[in-house]
Amino acid sequence: MSFEAKHFINDPTQLVLSALKSITLTNPTTALDTENKVIYLRPDAAKPQVSLVSGGGSGHEPSFAAFVGPGLLSGAVAGTIFASPSAEQIRRCILGRVEASKGVLVIVMNYTGDVLNFGMAVEKAKAAGMDVEMVVMGDDAGVGREAGGKVGRRGIAGTVLVHKISGALAATGASLKEVHKVAQLVADNTVSIGSSLSHVHVPGREVTEDELKKDEVEIGMGIHNEAGSEKTTADLSGIVKTMLKYMLDSSDKDRAFLSISSSDETVLLVNNLGGVSVLEMGGITTEVVTQLANEYSIKPVRIIAGTFMTSLNGVGFSISLLRTKDTGIGKSMLELLDAPAECSGWSAAISSSTWSKPPTETVEKSGAEAGENKPCGLEMDPNLATRGLKTALEHVIKAEPDITKYDTVVGDGDCGIGLKRGAEGVLEHINSATGQADAALYLDKIISIVENTMDGTSGALYAIFLNALAHGLRSQSDSGSKQADAKVWAKALSIAMESMGKYTPAQPGDRTLVDALAPFVEQLGASGDVQKAAQAADEGAKSTKGMKASLGRTVYVGGSGFKEVPDPGAYGLAVFFNGLAEGLR
């Protein structure tokens, strides 16, 4: 069974009802009609206004139920997963669950079952004497005119722009005629397309073998697993290029549904189909915005990215573009889009004033970056220090295979690479650096390299320790000493050890790099002899072989590997200290 076919809730009926119930838990303005699977706005949550009703099959969350709230929808009707609700469910929503005194606008996506069932309910409501209008949304450029035939384009994520703008207008007290007009205007000026890496699995259904190949992407795939326009193995840049071509190429007579030029004011919606990480959605959004600017000279005045209409946990995304038009009622589309909405599904948080007059200042260089650190006034022989450091770093680089081998046994295998990366960075610096006799300033340059080249837990610990070591040197600037001798370094090291203790509880015996560091610091303070201190560090590192870890990733790895190898962090540090001692002889 693939990852996509595994679910926490496998009963589709329970899944839909429990998901609908969650809407009322996260938004107090909503209520649930369990029998009809209707989420509706509580009567005392908003003043009487034109009510907006939408819905469709479940599986597209947060559409539609999570858009119910003041400023957006008044009611949402849910079918089973990927199946339209019945006409009776919809009729009961229109006639009995939403405010109807000002009229009702029904917004439905262009799928046969949805159009028929919502349409039937609308006609029943009209027959009962209610003032009801309906907008059918078809924005998908993945379906061309020839393939769409008489059915037309499917409705996908651009629908939420219709919801949002017309919902905000209804909240102002506008008439049904005005709300209907603007909703249709938004629908007529929106174009969308989606792409997916795989088909989705519906809970409770058999797993099918109809799946894309590992390196394939389906451009134009629908939000119910419908076939797309084409399959490709292109990278993200190529995928976005094709998607935008289908949306914007005016020479493609089969798909030139909407003409958008560089002079048009546009809104961009980049929508997650459910299974794309937030991190990757950021990269996708940047790619779309960049190509729109570079290839079409289109620079949207609003860029909205997030999860608005999904296909369960679909590993895909869709792009929607709205060409704004004059509403003719004194409220612009942008103003209505930016208006607040008290619902859990709408996540565009930037206000109109911020969009229209965005802050423009940047911080090119902070005060801390511009200012130079102060010298400590303790001098050393930079040539001797560089010689010792160079030998130490070369030892660490040479020991990387052993450190990596040990860390593969008891950790995640990255310790050796991290130490080597840091060592190579520092080595490159000292090979090209001019002599710096002030001990703290000499150390500052090394700290900067360590901070930028070493990551992970060990990188953070080294950076904390070295910064505290520099502080330890500067704290002795008024000690009367002019030389950074062994006594000065020993005291600075003790201060650094104390500072590091604020961020990690590691002590000798915990099987960490502290098992090598603490003996070095202690012995240097006692004897002032780097050779003896390095020997103590080596013995400390060796003692970790067979020592059970109480901190670090080794705790979670388990197994008996710790009995066979020393702690890789302690071993690597001991190698460094031995090299330092050798270079300073």
Image (tube, helix red, strand yellow):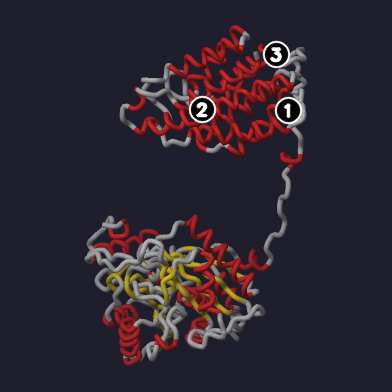
Residue 428 lies, in percent from the top left, at: 66, 34
* Mark closer to the chain start, 3 or 2: 2
Q: Is residue 453 above or below residue 270?
A: above
Query: Residue 387: which numbered mark, if any?
Result: none
Q: Name the quarter where the C terminus is drawn.
A: top right
Q: What amino acid type should be assigned to the residue bearing mark 1? A: Leu
Query: Which of the two discs, 3 and 2, sits closer to the camera?
Result: 2
Query: Which of the two discs, 1 and 2, sits closer to the camera?
Result: 2
Question: Disc 1 marks which residue?
Answer: 441
Residue 457 lies, in percent from the top left, at: 50, 34
Check disc 1: other Cα within 10 Å, few if <14, some if 14-19, many if 20+: many
Question: Disc 3 marks which residue?
Answer: 485
Q: In this view, does 546 lie above or below 525?
A: below
- Tell me the SS state at disc 2: helix
Residue 105 appears in the rendering:
no
Where residue 397 sits, quadrant-wise, is: top right
